[in-house]
Image (cartoon, rainbow, N blue to C red):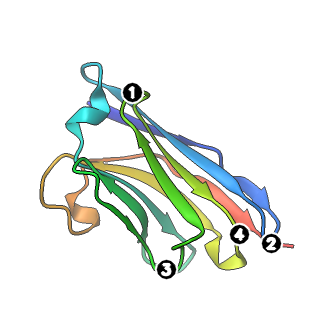
Amino acid sequence: QMHLVESGGGSVQPGGSLQLSCEVSGEASGSILNINAMTWYRQAPGNQRELVAQSRSDGTIKYADSVKGRFTIIRDNAKNSATLQMNSLKPGDTAVYYCAAARGSVVTGVKDYDYWGQGTQVTVSS
């Protein structure tokens, strides 16, 4: 069994920055090496869960159009972690952010993820 634990959420004013961390643990050491896609999703009240940023084991990185140029995902296999650096935050970024991990090679949506973190709240307001 693998576990994902997010940290780093909080409240910030528009234009501010936050860094979210996802620690991967469980199974053998080097857990994150068994993962294809490490992804940050977010879900605002009344909305569907949406992909924010994804890092795959082949080095491919993908961002939602709404966060391109502002957010950066960093996957650190040595530390078994995936970090989301969020800059120039906007009120529209307010949501619960989830870390997710998928083992398989086919990763097209939320149904393809094997493990989820508990979520961390990010609130952007003045």
Secondary structure of the residue carrying tag 3 is: loop
Q: Are marks 2 and 4 in contact (CB under 8 Å)?
A: no
Rendering coords of residue 31 (x, y %): 29, 29
Amino acid type at circle 4 is: Ser
Which of the 4 quarters of the picture holds residue 69? bottom right
Q: Are marks 1 and 3 in contact (CB under 8 Å)?
A: no
Q: Nearer the viewer, residue 19 or 116?
A: 19
Above or below residue 66? Residue 119 is above
Q: Residue at x 67, y 63 (%)?
A: 87
Badge 2 crowding class, 10 Å Cα cut-off, few under 14, some 14 to 19, many 20 or more, is some
Amino acid type at circle 2 is: Ser
Q: CA distance from mark 4 to mark 3?
A: 22 Å
Rendering coords of residue 51 (x, y %): 40, 69
Q: Earlier in the sequence, mark 1 or mark 3?
A: 3
Numbered badge on residue 78: 1
Secondary structure of the residue carrying tag 4 is: loop
Q: Nearer the viewer, mark 1 or mark 3?
A: 1
Numbered badge on residue 125: 2
Q: CA distance from mark 2 to mark 1?
A: 35 Å
Name the side, left or right, on which 77 lies relative to 95.
left
Q: Which residue is mark 4?
A: 88
